[in-house]
Image (cartoon, helix red, strand yellow):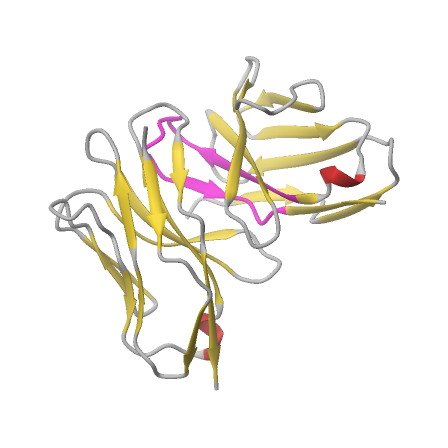
Amino acid sequence: GDSVTQMEGPVTLSEEAFLTINCTYTATGYPSLFWYVQYPGEGLQLLLKATKADDKGSNKGFEATYRKETTSFHLEKGSVQVSDSAVYFCRAGGTSYGKLTFGQGTILTVHP
Amino acid sequence: GAVVSQHPSRVICKSGTSVKIECRSLDFQATTMFWYRQFPKQSLMLMATSNEGSKATYEQGVEKDKFLINHASLTLSTLTVTSAHPEDSSFYICSASITGLAYNEQFFGPGTRLTVL
């Protein structure tokens, strides 16, 4: 079945550091790939997405590229801010009805 | 973008009571809505999928008599936690999909924090 593996956290960085959160997936077909962000006490917000190979999703300084050859969708940001502290979820949208697959989430804490 | 609301955002109830959580799509018609449960510091667990006008499809291990889901219209789905107990305390999140296909984008509600005393 479909699965998503995220880099285990928590990740702790200083402000302006470079961020990478790894995400790899296994799926039949070619799923759409998403990154969601969840701030403390809130629901999920879509951060970015990519729907086909080599697509790059970007938003708020975050980027992720759909790599079919490595089945990966790593999240990157060149310079993190304290306000980026949150939980980040990678998701693969499979072709099976209703069977959406989330990664386990990565807690990011950014210190001033 | 599409907006999904949940009500209430927080609820505290006594053990043995029932709690209803509403999920609404505000500016689109959602053919399918999904209910998730999230434990502290954990990922989302899909509980059930509901289509407007039909019975919900529950994931393995989710008690359908405990978690009643109704999707009466294209903009509203409700989750009722019946005879709630402290172990039901959790963060419940709904999402809505326009076409109902898994690989299409889902729009998430802000979540409901349920605390059962």
In the image, residue B22 sits, relative to residue A21, either above or below, namely above
Q: Looking at the image, which is closer to me, B53 or B17?
A: B17
Q: Looking at the image, which is closer to me, A63 or B89?
A: B89
In the image, residue B52 sits, relative to residue A39, either above or below, namely above
Q: Position of residue B82 (x, y in %)?
A: 77, 26
Side of B66 relative to B77 (left or right): right
Q: Looking at the image, which is closer to me, A97 or A14?
A: A14
Q: Position of residue B38 (x, y in %)?
A: 58, 44
Residue at the extreme front: A8
The residue stretch that appears in magenta: B91-111
Q: How many callouts does the rendering have? A: 0
Side of B112 relative to B26 (left or right): right
User: Residue at image x 37%, y 27%?
Assistant: B99
User: Residue at image x 30%, y 32%?
Assistant: A94
Is residue A37 on the magenta stretch?
no
User: Residue at image x 46%, y 65%?
Assistant: A10
Is residue B94 on the magenta stretch?
yes
Q: Looking at the image, which is closer to me, A28 or B34?
A: A28
Q: Position of residue A91 (x, y in %)?
A: 36, 44
Residue at the extreme bottom: A112
Q: Position of residue A50 (x, y in %)?
A: 24, 48
In the image, residue B9 sits, relative to residue B19, either above or below, namely below
Quadrant occupied by the C terminus of chain B: top right
Side of A81 relative to A17 (left or right): right
